[in-house]
């Protein structure tokens, strides 16, 4: 029922979902660094710098926050092994869409990795049922889509899973409304990720996402409240959220998508945190 491919998605950067899966399969017997996030990971990390710093292969699975935090982890969980390092930096947000995803999940799995539907929980199936009709409408709308260029194209994905297409700051970036982040169900899933990786001997680094400076300044109180809530629940962020807020000029077209230079700068901060934590 859900095997209809969206041609626009097929030619887009969303293809990284299956490319990352295939690379992890090829590295199943090798220790590696695996980045799990939404597009703040895909557009705003230079995995090559991380590989140079730690001399381990890096797989950036990050594609789209719209697939939901649960499937960002579940799709790849079985391909992780003892001794792996997982860098987990989900975007800010709350509610069932943040946890379970939306029409983006149906589009990406149906187009690129339908076998991952087996990973959905019963509650998640109930949540995404309402998006199936949207998916088929998009399939029909995009039926004539062809290969294209740019940072949102499949051509922009490098061998690690990063977006590697030159992108310059746009002056019309609209801030997100980030508030009321307290979400017990989401925290329960974060706890599950922490406990599962610990039991399997996988090193989990739980880091904040990058966020454009003006958006962080506007919503700092809510973000810091969220960080404190995580700490109270025994799963603190392992770096200050403010460390990952950078000048607006380093962002491309959304509060999470950085320019190429911005991605390098964010990655250097991440490497510093990783070195500190792995000691």
Image: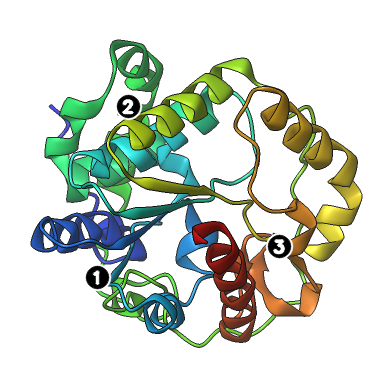
The residue under the point 57% across, 82% down is: 264
Looking at marks 1 and 2 on the same chain, the residue that comes earlier in the sequence is marked by: 2
The residue under the point 17% across, 63% down is: 23
- Separation of disc 2 and disc 3 at Cα? 38 Å
Q: Nearer the viewer, residue 128 or 70?
A: 70
Residue 190 located left or right of residue 193: right
Using the image, tell me which numbered label, if any, was put on residue 133: 2
Q: Residues within 10 Å of mark 3 (few under 14, many from 20)?
A: many
Q: Residues within 10 Å of mark 1 (few under 14, many from 20)?
A: few
The residue under the point 42% across, 70% down is: 152
Looking at marks 1 and 3 on the same chain, the residue that comes earlier in the sequence is marked by: 1
Query: Residue 122 appears in which quarter of the rendering?
Result: top left
The residue under the point 35% across, 37% down is: 197
Q: Nearer the viewer, residue 37 or 4?
A: 37
Q: Which residue is mark 1?
A: 146
> Residue at the front extreme?
279
Using the image, determine if residue 276 lies above or below residue 229: below
């Amino acid at each position: 029922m859900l095997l209809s491919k969206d041609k626009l998605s097929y030619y887009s950067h969303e293809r990284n979902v299956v490319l990352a899966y295939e690379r992890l399969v090829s590295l199943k017997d090798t220790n590696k660094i695996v980045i799990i996030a939404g597009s703040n990971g895909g557009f705003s990390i230079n995995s090559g710098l991380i590989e140079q710093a730690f001399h381990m292969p890096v797989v950036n699975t990050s594609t789209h926050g719209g697939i939901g935090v649960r499937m960002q982890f579940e799709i790849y969980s079985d391909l992780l092994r003892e001794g792996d390092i997982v860098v987990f930096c989900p975007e800010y947000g709350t509610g069932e869409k943040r946890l379970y995803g939306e029409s983006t999940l149906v589009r990406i799995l149906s187009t690129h990795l339908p076998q991952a539907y087996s990973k959905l929980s019963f509650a998640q199936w109930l949540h995404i049922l309402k998006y199936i009709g949207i998916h088929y409408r998009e399939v029909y709308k995009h039926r004539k889509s062809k290969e294209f260029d740019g940072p949102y194209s499949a051509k922009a994905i490098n061998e690690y899973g990063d977006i590697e297409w030159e992108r310059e700051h746009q002056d019309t970036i609209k801030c997100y409304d980030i508030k009321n982040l307290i979400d017990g169900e989401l925290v329960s899933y974060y706890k599950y990720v922490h406990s599962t990786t610990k039991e399997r001997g996988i090193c989990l680094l739980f880091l904040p996402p990058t966020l454009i400076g003006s958006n962080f300044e506007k919503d700092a109180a809510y973000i810091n409240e969220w960080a404190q809530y995580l700490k109270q629940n025994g799963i603190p962020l392992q770096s200050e959220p403010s460390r990952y807020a950078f000048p607006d000029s380093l962002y491309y077209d959304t509060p999470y998508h950085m320019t190429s230079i911005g991605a390098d700068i964010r990655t250097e901060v991440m490497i510093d945190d990783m070195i500190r934590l792995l000691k």
